[in-house]
Amino acid sequence: MRREELLILLTFLLFVQGYFLRNVFPALLAFTIILYLIYLRSEFSPEIEAEREVDNRLTEGERARSRLRLRNLTGKKLKIAILEDFLPHGFKAEVPHPFMLNEGEEREVEYFIVPVRGVHTIKGPRVRVMDSRELYYSDFIVDSEIDVEVYPSLDRIREEARAEENIKIATTYQKALLGLQTMEIHSLRKFQPGDDTKHVEWKATARLGELIVKDFLREVEGDIYIILDAGREMRKGIRSSKIDYATTLTLQLAYALGRYRVGLIVYDDYGIKYRVEASKSPEQIERIVRSLKITPVYSDILGVKIPEISFRVSKEARNFLRKVMPAIKGRRSFATGLMESVSALPSSAFLIFISDITAHTGELIRVLSELKNRHKILLLTPNPVLFYDESRIDRETLLWLYRRYLEREEVVRKFSRMVPTLDLGPSDLLEVIREAIK
Amino acid sequence: MIAVLAAVVGGLIAGIYTPLLSPVLYLLRSRRDLFLLLFLAYCLALGYEFEVANVYEADLVGVLAIILPSILLLDAGLRGEEGSLRGSATYAAALAILIGLFVREVFVLGVLIALIHHFSRDYPRRGAAVSLTGISLLILGLFAGSGMLNLPGGAPSQVVFISAVGILLALFFWRNIKTTELFS
């Protein structure tokens, strides 16, 4: 029920009361209340002017200042409420409490919005203007569209990385990840599962009666390239997208490997999006952060069943489409994004691939099998099954997800035979990967 | 505060007790929705307590002494904390209302001053004209139809006539505006 409706109900009851009790007074009182309501309705014609300002460069998760300049163009007091219902998905707003704007007054209201990473357009806000009695309102949508770039929060990544083992993490990483070893023997140690049998020191083994292996000095100077897949498959998401997770992981890796020459290549379905050359400079993390403005694609659809329709396309037509479609979608050559990115790599480097292996499986296998002889490779792959919103899963979806999970296991095994492969869920960040590799 | 004073004094002038509850309503002005619900009960109680059998023979000062403070109270309650007013006009109105205890006509003058002062904050234009037009139409209608309405036991016909004028006015001047929810 609405406030005004309560007063209308009152007038109706008063008229009925007057009629049945043969009393004119309630009718006169009801008539006066009707006049009062007509008076208020006639006087309510709000007009405001509003303009919003927001910085174009924001940092994910950090409160960004939004300045809203409001001007009351009427000769009456108005109550103002700010409603941020046009913000991009994932954004949050800390709007101020409703406030009074005096007749002709101009005021600048400051409040905060908390953005999520990506390139977005901020529209609105909606300004609800009420009369001073709060019986009526009118909504005004501020005519502004501001394009903002939201970068991942460097401080947060640093804190997360520090929280685990502070600076030690980088050293551990070197041991765990960097296999760029020299032929110089560093020490002898007991055999551990996973050690190459070629490195067994037979003389020492015979002398001590247990398996002893040679530990080689590891080369610390080498380029490390993080190759991040930002294709559509990675950007899709219902609760959270894989790219959100992958960019956080990229930054954590970049930060943890800060002592080495770390570079980044971001590619999508049509080519290289960003490339940051390997460098040890202190600004390198900043450069990497700037290259991670990737917008996720959110969807409310969990799974749509498409009816099975089969139609034949001739071989010639298929070949034609294969050649034409990439060009239509903006690809610059016949090489895919992945091909383009690996062709730009130096002759020898440590490569960390972050990609969804189910998106372009065949191509990824081809590329990795070609690269594994020249480079040390680690493949990190966010498992899409683990990125589903569990609150929206029913029995049928669960079964479907399980089947997909099993199929995926097989693919992961295939990749693991080639290069070390880690299947990751949304909560597996740096620490988990480090533990897994150990 | 002037609304409460007017309601209490108006109640004393009219000889009824319901307006003595007006301070309770006034104290609830910060909780608009609760105030509206209580105001509904308050008005119905006024309707039971104060009787006018024939509008043509009614005690006009008595009727105004109840109706005008009720509207003042309703507006003060809806404005919430913004409702209270101070200033020379308010003090003059308060003085006139108090004098009204002895000279009833001065009370009506005092309430009218308070009402005009209270609504002048809206800088009214169209609304004031519409309200005055509505009152004039009702008075004119009552005079024009006195032959049919001024009869012994004619209260129901008068109620129907007043409600008809009220509904017609509402239909004529109603504008399409979004309204706020109760307990929103």
Image (tube, coloured by chain):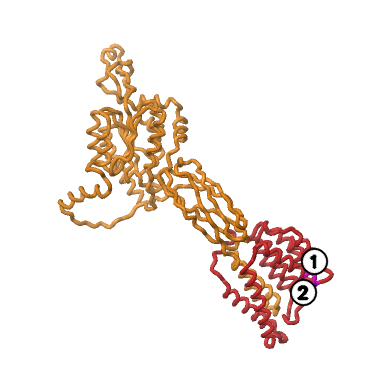
Q: Position of residue A334 (x, y in %)?
A: 22, 43
The residue that appears at 31% across and 45% down in the rendered structure is A404
Q: Residue furthest bottom?
A: B147
Residue in the picture at 24% in, 57% down: A309
Same-subunit check for callouts 2 and 1: yes
Left or right of B74? Residue A122 is left
Q: Is residue A193 left or right of residue A70?
A: left
Disc 2 target residue: B61
Q: Which mark is on residue B96?
A: 1
Q: What subunit carries mark 1?
A: B
Disc 1 marks which amino acid? Ala
At mark 1, the secondary structure is helix
Q: Is residue A318 above or below residue B68?
A: above
A352 in magenta: no
Is the residue B166 above or below the residue A54 in the image?
Answer: below
Near-viewer residue (A74 or B150)? A74
Q: CA distance from mark 2 to mark 1?
A: 14 Å
Residue A37: tell me if it is visible. Answer: no
**Residue depth check, mark 2 versus mark 1: number of the one nearer the observer:** 1
Q: How many marks?
A: 2
Residue at the extreme top: A207
Instruction: Report the side of A37 relative to B96 (left or right).
Output: left
Residue name at image x 75 percent, y 71 percent = B65
Q: Which residues are magenta?
A: B104-108
Residue A198 position in % (x across, y down): 24, 21
Tell me if mark 2 has few (under 14), some (14-19) or many (20+) residues whose alpha carbon lies within 10 angstroms of its own.
Answer: some
Check the rendered structure and report the hue given to chain A: orange
Quarter assignment of residue A168: top left
Residue B52 in picture, x, y percent from top left: 73, 78
